[in-house]
Image: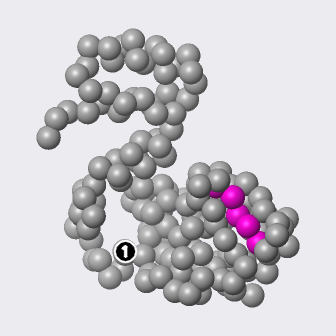
Amino acid sequence: MPSLVIGIASSAAERRQLAQLLGGTETFLIVSSAHQARRFLDLLRAPGAARPGPARDAAADDPPPAGPPVSGLDVDSDRRVLRWREREVGLTPLEHDLLLCLARTPGQVWTYAQLHRAVWGNDHLGRGSDMHSVVRRVRRKLGRIGAVPTILAVRGIGFRLAAS
């Protein structure tokens, strides 16, 4: 497999500077965030390919199976918006990914580890304040558009989307 260098630079000026620095590199890609880099790498992985990293218990770490959708709730990935009936609100990439996980499996509990792996793309949990911050913002946005479904915390385990 050929080598690929991925550079991350948030501003246009930094991307130009990074392109100059990497100019002699055979193949390089410049993205504006670690999130975009992870998305690109996920596209390169073959379907069903295991993620690199330590061995883990698949039953404990894999996402819950998909359940029936919550009626009236739609996460539009093309436009990155949350829609409840006729109202909609924009989502950040992290808000989108977290809500998409929960909305695909309403009622099912996603553990902190499962969500961190699916949304942030790594196993680092830290204090969990990053996840709680995103959940808080999504709850606010659900309330702003008058959505009935809400995100419930399952103490010490994770989160789930409740239909009502």
Segment tinted magenta in the rendering? 80-84
Which residue matches tag 1? Answer: 61
Q: How many marks?
A: 1
> x, y percentage for residue 136?
72, 63
Question: In which quarter of the view is residue 129 placed?
Answer: bottom right
Q: Is residue 155 left or right of residue 14?
A: right
Q: Can the viewer see residue 144?
A: yes
Vertical position of residue 78 compared to residue 157: above or below? above
> x, y percentage for residue 88?
78, 62
The disc labelled 1 sits on which kind of residue?
Answer: Asp
Q: Can the viewer see residue 157?
A: no
Vertical position of residue 28 compared to residue 43: above or below? above
Q: Is residue 25 left or right of residue 102?
A: left
* Quadrant where the image shows the C terminus: bottom right
Q: Residue at horizontal 26%, vertical 13%?
A: 24
> x, y percentage for residue 8?
45, 31
Q: Residue at horizontal 29%, vertical 77%?
A: 58
> x, y percentage for residue 156?
55, 78
Q: Main secondary structure of the magenta part?
A: strand
Q: Residue at horizontal 26%, vertical 27%?
A: 27
Neighbourhood count class around disc 1 (C-alpha, 10 Å): few under 14, some 14–19, many 20 upward: some
